[in-house]
Amino acid sequence: MNIILLGPPGAGKGTQAKVLAQRLNFPHISTGDLLRQNVSAGTELGKKAKDFMNKGMLVPDELVNQMLVERFKVPGCENGFILDGYPRNLSQAKALDAILKDRRTGIGLVVYLDASDSVIIQRISGRLVCSACGESFHITNMPPKIPMVCDKCKGKLYQRSDDTADTVKQRLAVYKNEVSSLIDYYQSGGILNRVSADGEAEEVLNTIVKMVQDLRRQKTAAG
Ligand code: AMP
């Protein structure tokens, strides 16, 4: 089953996608992570994307769509995948449908993680990410045992360059501008499910897992 996690920056898409991917044994595909890897590796794509990302703007669709086509060529997505951070607008949603149609598959579930602005800003402004394994922490909500050191791999933690107050406001504005068309699109396809993401991560995860199990049961029953 192919799953999309939709929601504002800071709703916990990355955190949820990572755990869900492990539980379901699906790859977690985050366009933000793929872009950051390209920026730090200094690739042509990274050079083109860097300024857009630092300003909190969307990287042009054709660059992100092409990056995704390349990602799908890596074996491992055959039984399902979890997309996080993509699509960000209607044109990407349509591009994704076309890419998946070529692969004779489609999206089975879209989970819309709904979080309030105050929760988003509090989460993002304290977010810390491991430079080695990508694990996320939070200065107050989920502090690492040793300051600025990853609990899992002992890598160095850092604050993302686009997690500053001004850039977060811009990212939220971009998000709000685009999200309603995406919600309409997936709602009319009958695959959108809303989940409140203001609560604890564990609680949100359990709700999503139940959703996936129910859907699988329905599909099995329908034969
Ligand atoms: P994220 O890690 O999902 O918050 O993404 C960080 C930044 O990467 C965004 O603010 C955009 O600049 C860029 N980005 C990530 N995914 C996309 C996408 N699907 N389309 C365009 N830009 C993206």
Image (spheres, rainbow, N blue to C red):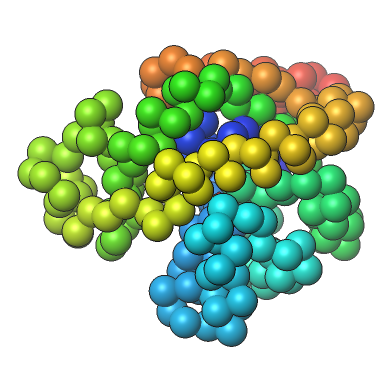
Image position of 200 with respect to 70: above or below:
above
Image position of 195 with respect to 172: above or below:
above
Image position of 190 with respect to 138: above or below:
above
Residue in the picture at 67% in, 19% down: 194
Q: Is residue 142 left or right of residue 31?
A: left
Residue 56 place in picture, x, y as percent: 56, 53
Residue in the picture at 53% in, 24% down: 117
Residue 176 place in picture, x, y as percent: 70, 34
Q: Residue furthest left?
A: 146
Asked if residue 206 can be seen in this view, the reply is no
Q: Quadrant of the image for the N terminus?
A: top right
Q: Is residue 93 left or right of residue 7?
A: right
Q: Nearer the viewer, residue 220 or 207?
A: 207
Q: Is residue 45 left or right of residue 178?
A: left
Image position of 107 with respect to 117: above or below:
below
Q: Nearer the viewer, residue 195 or 217?
A: 195
Asked if residue 160 can be seen in this view, the reply is yes
Q: Is residue 161 left or right of residue 142?
A: right
Residue in the picture at 66% in, 56% down: 58
